[in-house]
C-alpha cells in the first residue's frame, strides 16, 4: 500500500513538474476552490486561525483572507513537483528578486554562523534551495512515512548544496557544530512542538501559543546571527526576502527570546498574510486546556 501511495504521489508531482509554473499554480488553485467549497477540518482551522490572528477585520474580510490563504496553500502544493523535480538551474531562474541576502553573506565573511528562520510562508522549499547559493547549509529533516517519497525529497532539497540531518540529538549536534564553524542553518521556527519540554507558551499575533525553544537555544549556544527569510510567491516566480531579527532574540531570558522570535515571524507574515500556512492549529497551548481555542 505504501508503495502504491508513493508512486501515486510521485506521478502527481511529475504531472505538476511538466506544466509551466503558472499552469501548475492555476490547476492547484482550482482544485483548492473545490476543497474549500466542500469544507472540512482544514477549512474550519483556517477560518478559526484568521479570526484569532486578525480580530480587527470584519466577517467578510476574515472570510476572504481565509479563502485566499487556503488557495495559496493549494498553489504551494502545485509548485512542489515543479520545485522538486525540475533542474535546480530552472528553479533558480524563477527567483525574480532577492533582498537582504547581504545579512547572511556579510556574517559568513566575518566567520560568524547564521541561523535562518524560515516560517511556513510562501514557498520555504525555494528559500532552502536559495540558501545553498549563499554558503554551506545544514538543515533538519524529519523523513516522511513513505520511504520512496522521502528519498525524492532529500535528493531535491540537497540539489543546491544543502546537507540534511535528522531531527534527533545527533542531527542537532551536527547542525550546532556546523553553525559554530561559521556556516548556515535553516530552521522552521513556527512548528508546534509535540513535547512539553520543547517549548513555552508565549504571545503570537495577540494570542498565547506553544512555541518551540530549539531555534532560540541554537542561536544562544552558537553565537550565530539570526535572520528571517521567506520566498514570496509573485507572478512568474518568487521574491526572496531576508530580514534582520530583533536584538531581543539573543536574550538569555528564553521567554523574551521567544517573543522576539514570534514577532519576527509576524513581520514576515505582514508582507503576504494570505501566503502563511494558516491550515494547522498554530494557536495551541501546553497544556491544551490553558487556551481551548479549537473545538474540533
Image (spheres, helix red, strand yellow):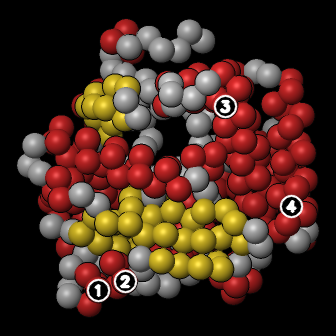
Q: Earlier in the sequence, mark 3 or mark 2?
A: 3
What residue is shown at x 34% (from left), y 25% (from top)?
208
Which numbered mark, 3 or 2, is in the foreground of this view? 3
Residues marked 1 and 2 touching at CB (< 8 Å)? yes
Mark 1–mark 4 contact, CB under 8 Å?
Answer: no
Residue identified by numbered label 2: 102
Q: Residue at x 76, y 68 (%)?
A: 235
Q: Which residue is mark 4?
A: 24
Mark 4 or mark 2: which comes first in sequence?
Answer: 4
Q: Is residue 46 above or below residue 91?
A: above
Mark 1 highlights which residue? 106
Q: Is residue 285 visible?
A: yes
Q: Is residue 223 left or right of residue 274?
A: left
| Residue furthest bottom in the image | 109
Q: Secondary structure at mark 3?
A: helix
Residue 148 tag number: none
Up-down relation of residue 252 to residue 125 (above or below): above
- The quadrant in which the N terminus is found is top right
Residue depicted at x 56% and y 9% = 295
| Alpha carbons under labels 3 and 4: distance apart | 27 Å
How crowded pointer 2 is (Cα within 10 Å; few <14, some 14-19, many 20+) is rated as few
Are there few (<14), some (14-19), or many (20+) residues within 10 Å of tag 4? many
Q: Secondary structure at mark 1?
A: helix
Q: Which marked residue is nearer to the observer: mark 3 or mark 4?
A: 3
Which quarter of the image is occupied by the C terminus?
A: top right
Which SS class for mark 2? helix
Closer to the chain start, of discs 1 and 4, is: 4
Q: Secondary structure at mark 4?
A: helix
Residue 251 on image: x %, y %: 12, 51
Q: CA distance from mark 4 to mark 2?
A: 32 Å
Spatial CA distance of label 3 from label 2 is 37 Å
Amino acid at each position: 500500500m505504501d508503495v502504491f501511495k508513493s508512486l501515486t504521489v510521485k506521478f502527481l508531482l511529475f504531472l505538476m513538474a511538466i506544466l509551466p509554473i503558472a499552469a501548475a499554480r492555476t490547476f492547484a488553485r482550482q482544485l483548492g476552490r473545490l476543497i474549500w467549497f466542500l469544507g472540512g477540518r482544514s477549512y474550519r482551522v483556517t477560518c478559526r486561525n484568521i479570526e484569532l490572528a486578525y480580530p480587527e477585520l470584519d466577517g467578510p474580510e476574515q472570510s476572504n483572507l481565509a479563502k485566499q490563504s487556503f488557495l495559496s496553500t493549494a498553489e504551494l502544493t502545485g509548485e512542489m513537483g515543479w520545485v522538486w523535480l525540475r533542474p535546480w538551474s530552472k528553479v533558480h531562474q524563477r527567483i525574480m528578486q532577492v533582498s537582504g541576502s547581504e545579512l547572511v553573506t556579510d556574517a559568513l565573511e566575518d566567520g560568524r554562523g547564521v541561523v535562518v528562520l524560515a516560517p511556513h510562508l510562501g514557498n520555504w522549499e525555494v528559500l532552502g534551495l536559495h540558501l545553498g547559493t549563499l554558503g554551506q547549509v545544514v538543515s533538519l529533516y524529519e523523513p516522511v512515512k513513505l520511504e520512496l517519497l522521502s528519498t525524492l525529497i532529500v535528493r531535491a532539497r540537497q540539489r543546491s548544496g544543502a546537507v540534511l540531518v535528522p531531527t534527533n540529538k545527533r542531527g542537532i549536534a551536527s547542525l550546532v557544530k556546523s553553525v559554530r564553524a561559521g556556516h548556515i542553518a535553516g530552521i522552521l521556527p513556527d512548528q508546534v512542538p509535540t513535547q512539553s519540554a520543547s517549548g513555552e507558551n508565549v504571545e503570537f499575533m495577540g494570542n498565547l501559543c506553544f512555541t518551540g525553544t530549539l531555534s532560540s537555544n541554537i542561536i544562544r549556544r552558537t553565537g550565530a546571527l539570526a535572520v528571517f527569510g521567506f520566498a514570496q510567491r509573485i507572478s512568474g516566480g518568487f521574491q526572496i526576502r531576508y530580514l534582520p531579527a530583533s536584538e531581543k532574540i539573543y536574550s538569555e531570558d528564553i521567554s523574551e527570546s521567544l517573543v522576539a522570535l514570534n514577532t519576527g515571524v509576524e513581520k514576515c507574515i505582514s508582507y503576504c498574510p494570505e501566503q502563511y500556512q494558516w491550515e494547522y492549529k498554530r494557536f495551541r497551548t501546553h497544556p491544551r486546556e490553558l487556551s481551548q481555542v479549537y473545538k474540533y
